[in-house]
Image (cartoon, rainbow, N blue to C red):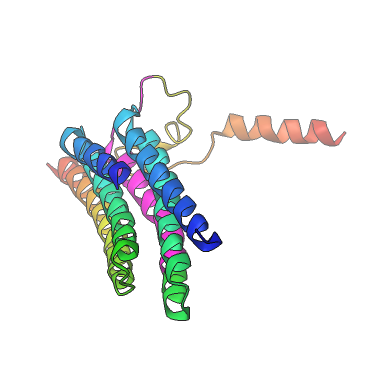
Amino acid sequence: MSVAEIIESVLLLVGAGLILLAAIGVVRMPDLLIRLHATTKAATLGSALMVAAVAVHFGSVQVVTRAIAVIVFLLITAPVAAHMLARASYFLGVPLWRRTVIDELGSHYDRETHELTAAEEEELAAIEAALVRDRQ
Amino acid sequence: MGMLCIALLLGFVRLFLGPSLPDRVLALDLITMIGIGIIALYAIATDRSVLLDVAIALGLILFLATVAFATFFERSTLARRRRRERG
């Protein structure tokens, strides 16, 4: 067994393991955002590693270039897609997990008019006062 | 291969269970990712590098499908809300 073959099989195994982890996370996790968190990163890295294994296996310039293109494309688009899906699901009103600790957007987003409002006057005044106190 | 097949099965479980529509889209997303992995594995097993092009196409479709679904959800929610305001 050559070094390239060992690297290749390690990449394949780690990639498949990460994808399996992502799938388990998708079934086991309690709400949509946590599921998104589980699948986006693990599955993206997993399939990127498997494509990298293809590049190691063939080793010619064309294949390596194409594999790099696939990996870069995956790494760029996966976060964008996940962000858009999470945003749409928030607007759609998909319920959060009942043990969610904080919903920072909740007090600023108006579900009826689809508008964001800035922090309240008192909050802003409190932040300002804290800043002034820090400077002194 | 076994790991990927189990992952595919779990993805389909979420596709059927998925309480909301975005959950199902998420499951489709995951299934396409697993598809890319299986294609990579198949390319190595059969020694055919052409199959990498299929992975590129699948990646493109994955991104476009998710973005299209997200936009569609957002638009339909807004439209429903506007209709409720009017009616």
Q: Position of residue A57 (x, y in %)?
A: 44, 66
Q: Tell me if residue B78 comes above or below residue A120 in the rendering.
A: below
Can residue A73 be seen here? The reply is: no
Span shown in magenta: A70-98
The quadrant in which residue A116 appears is: top left
The quadrant in which residue B7 appears is: top left
The quadrant in which residue B56 appears is: bottom left
- Side of A115 where A119 appears, left or right: right
Q: Tell me if residue B50 comes above or below residue A100 in the rendering.
A: below
Indicate whether residue A102 is drawn in magenta.
Answer: no
Q: Residue at 45% across / 68% down in the picture?
A: A55
Quick one: quadrant of the C terminus of chain A? top right
- Side of B34 where A51 appears, left or right: right
In this rendered view, identify the residue nearer to me: B27 or A56. Answer: A56
In this rendered view, identify the residue nearer to me: A12 or B74. Answer: A12
- Side of B77 where A26 appears, left or right: right
Q: Position of residue A111 (x, y in %)?
A: 32, 37
- Mainly helix, strand or loop, the magenta region? helix
Indicate whether residue A71 is drawn in magenta.
Answer: yes
